[in-house]
Image (tube, rainbow, N blue to C red):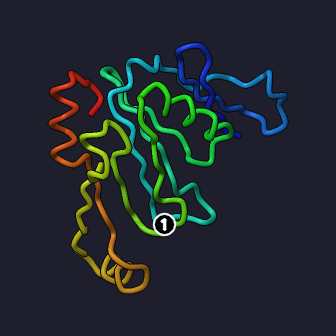
């Protein structure tokens, strides 16, 4: 089980290698100082309901961190981030079943597409059949306005 938690001034993402570990035995996957976060975004895919299909993105100057939306402790983390960022962080994709993304914070980018999606043109019979049966395949990358913002913020991991 993945969990998110704020302790002091850090955001932690925890996981365990064995589902039955005690909560105290969780291992940190990543941690970041909240003051270092320059952008928060959300994205969904069309891969649910049997695969993880909803993610949170936390960008800092040195790295981009991802977590599942289904992480334990998410509500408490967002309450803390609401206070630290002085605005409510609103999630909008909880019932989405398709590819979508948006910036949640900072306020001047809120609602902007985080990813730019491009349809991959079928180039053989297999990809043509895939498109006919399952729909188009999509490539995605960080949208240009967001890449520009991250570059200006000095982010290395965009």
State whether residue 144 is above or below residue 122: above
- Residue 8 placement, left or right of 110: right
The front one of 114 and 75 is 75
Question: The C terminus is located in which quarter?
Answer: top left
Q: Position of residue 105 (x, y in %)?
A: 35, 38
Instruction: State the residue at coordinates (52%, 57%).
Output: 53
Percent x, y of residue 110: 31, 46
Total residue callouts: 1
Q: Looking at the rendering, in which quadrant would you find the N terminus?
A: top right
Choose top left, top right, bottom left or bottom right for residue 89: top left
Residue found at the far top of this picture: 8
- At mark 1, the secondary structure is loop
Up the image or down, 115 lies above or below 89; here it is below
Which residue is identified by label 1?
Answer: 96
In this rendering, position of residue 8 left or right of residue 17: left
Q: Is residue 143 above or below residue 36?
A: below
| Quadrant assignment, res 61 | top left
Residue at position x 34%, y 34% from top? Answer: 39
The residue at 25%/25% (across/down) is 155
Please indicate whether residue 49 sits to the left or right of residue 99 in the image. Answer: right
Query: Neighbour class for label 1 at 10 Å: few (<14), some, many (≥20)?
Result: some
* Residue drawn where x is 37% and y is 79% of the image: 135
Of residue 132 and residue 37, the one placed in the foreground of this image is: 37
Residue 23, image x, y percentages: 80, 28
């Amino acid at each position: 089980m993945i969990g998110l938690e704020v302790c002091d001034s850090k955001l932690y993402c925890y996981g365990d290698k064995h589902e039955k570990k005690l909560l105290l035995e969780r291992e940190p996957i990543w941690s970041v100082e909240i003051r270092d976060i320059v952008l928060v975004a959300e994205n969904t895919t069309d891969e649910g309901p049997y695969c993880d299909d909803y993610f949170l993105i936390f960008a800092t100057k040195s790295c981009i961190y991802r977590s599942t939306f289904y992480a334990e402790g998410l509500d408490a983390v967002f309450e803390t981030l609401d206070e630290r960022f002085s605005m409510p962080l609103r999630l909008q994709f909880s019932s989405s079943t398709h590819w979508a993304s948006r910036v949640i914070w900072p306020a001047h980018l809120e609602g902007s597409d985080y990813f730019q999606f491009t349809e991959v043109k079928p180039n053989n019979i297999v990809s043509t059949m895939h498109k006919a049966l399952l729909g188009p395949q999509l490539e995605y990358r960080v949208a240009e306005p967001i890449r520009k913002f991250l570059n200006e913020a000095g982010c290395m991991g965009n």
